[in-house]
Image: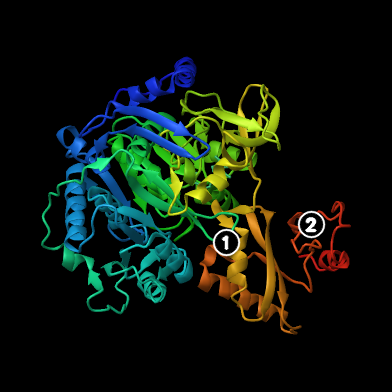
Amino acid sequence: MSTRITSFEEYKTVYSESVKNPEKFWVSVAGEYYWRRKWDEVLKWNFSEPDVKWFTGGKLNITENCLDRHLESRAKQTALIWEPNNPDEKGRTFTYRELYHEVCRFANMLRHHGVKKGDRVCIYMGMVPELAIALLGCARIGAIHSVVFGGFSFNSLADRINDAECCMVITADGAFRGAKDIPLKNVVDDALKNCPSVKKVIVLKRTGSDVRMQPGRDFWCHEEINNTHHDCHPEVMDAEDMLFILYTSGSTGKPKGVVHTTAGYMVFADYTFRNVFQYNDGDIYWCTADIGWVTGHTYLVYGPLLAGATTLMFEGIPTWPDAGRFWKIVDKYKVNIIYTAPTAIRSLQAMGLEYVKPYKLDSLRVLGTVGEPINEEAWHWYNDNIGKKRCPIVDTWWQTETGGILITPLAGITPLKPSFATLPFPGIQPAIVDENGKELSGNNVEGRLCIKFPWPGMIRTTYRNHARCRENYFEQYKGYYFTGDGCKRDENGFYRITGRVDDVIKVSGHLLGTAEVENAINQHPDIVESAVVGFPHAIKGWGIYAFVIPERERSDKEKLKKEISDTVTKFMGSIGRPDKIQIVRGLPKTRSGKIMRRILRKIAEGDTSNLGDTTTLLDPSVVDEIKAGAL
Ligand code: WT7
């Protein structure tokens, strides 16, 4: 494939052209695909609605571009490598031709079960090849997939299924993750007690654990797929037809269904993948993210397959059976490019170098990180011990809403600066604004990060609630897409993302709404009210600190805390479990009843020397009490 930037000089030229004439630039990228019909208009946009459309009138199917298009030249090339949780179990590989047939059969099965273009299908699985196949199977027939991370529990799953009114759930009997066996189907059963839209459940057999199959609703995947044909006519989609919904946390309790559409997402996923990682034909590429998150969608499945790459998928976790597992996999498959999260790097760093030493790691050429700011210490550990100082680190900044990477080095091309995401990708026009929405021009500035011009992979709406999309991203600073992140631009114009400026926290790279965790805590019958804030955590980046008010004084405080923790796990999933729980009598509230989180944040951070103005509080004495009991 031709369009790849190969030098820093070229980056600068391409970037400035992409800003001067964005439409011409994106057309030069979009010509490479298999279009059933070319577009009539490249871009229509208006950030106040918002209304953004790319390649209007174009017709295509993304799976024809991921699979069929490669059959001529890459049929026998490995498309997907799968490494199971247990290192003693045999892995699986799929050539492009094999993957094509698997996807077609899966798609035919979905059609056979009545799934049609535009229907929403929820996918709730572990990291098995059938998960990737399910995504592509949906896309083949024009169904909109909504993947829910397998670590979420029944209530979070039910909320997401209901919001999207899914007609089907694709799941598995269970999932292996380290020493654990997660009972996915049981969680689905619990969720479906309150999901009237779901008519069918397809169940993959993976762990062999006991499950209850409801006749007429639940079907075993292997039985249903048995007689399906290995070719499948793709649904011809409009450029702006929905491809998928992916839920992300917001500052209110309810997660938002971020909507991505077909053509723009496709062009952006592929072009960013090839350029950021500088993928060469024959490279083995490994993204360690779960497909339950956007990173897995764009840079494990769609981006690599669009580029005709070999993509590796791992079922397990970095620390099982021991903390050398990642490096064992790198050596086993001779991985050339690895893309992982700062939290994983920090946790492996903490385990010590003895887990790294047995491995050669000499196949590695490019290292990537994503999900949260990478601190300098972790950056150097990664650079010294994994990359052996010879692999560029691409610190890629982006979001579920952006569809793909926006601010990033290009591997081996852009000069690096630890903890900086460096420069905008071609076509991306960042702006740093002050609190009043005034753009801060020039270098050496700090403020809030916005984007002032559309890019093909951007969010189109939040599912069934367009107003929420507008309010969340386009209203705070008029004329801009607001990211929710703080940001600095240094003297050379390099960007450093400093973290969230809203009521969401990044815990181990996962975005969590504080209100979402509070809702889960409040499910405990003895809790009257709670407030959740983040605090800096050495491994997770941010930890969860919960202040809770019990209905009555309980002497068994530790037992109550354990119950709260279990309640959150059961109701929401273990990713919401608080690291610290402080039992309090009251919360710092203003006279109008608003919790002053600023004060709680300071206390959680252990910085109580200057709590700022507390005179507007209804009862300032609660602050002293909370301070005295801080953990
Ligand atoms: C938030 C988006 C992007 C895919 C996975 C996360 C933070 C992400 C970086 C980075 C600093 C980063 C931001 C962003 N973030 N990458 N390289 N440096 N911060 O997607 O769950 O939608 O989270 O992750 O705060 O807003 P997400």
Residue 253, labelled with which disc?
1
The residue at 19%/52% (across/down) is 102
The residue at 84%/65% (across/down) is 618
- Looking at the rendered image, the disc whose residue lies closer to the viewer, 2 or 1, is 1
Could you tell me if residue 426 is visible in this image? yes
Mark closer to the chain start, 2 or 1: 1
Q: How crowded is mark 2: few (under 14 residues within 10 Å), some or many (20 or more)?
A: many
26 relative to 609 in the view: left or right = left
Residue that label 2 marks: 599
Q: In which quarter of the image is ligand 1?
A: top right
Ligand 1 under 8 Å from disc 1 Cβ: no
Residue 438, compared with residue 301, is above or below; it is above
Could you tell me if residue 278 is visible in this image? no
Kind of residue sitting beneath label 1: Gly
Ligand 1 under 8 Å from disc 2 Cβ: no
Number of marks in picture: 2
Residue 283, labelled with which disc?
none
The residue at 55%/24% (across/down) is 415
Quarter of the figure that contains the N terminus: top left
Q: Residues within 10 Å of mark 1 (few under 14, many from 20)?
A: some
The residue at 23%/48% (across/down) is 140
Kind of residue sitting beneath label 2: Ile
Quarter of the figure that contains the C terminus: bottom right
357 relative to 526 in the view: left or right = left
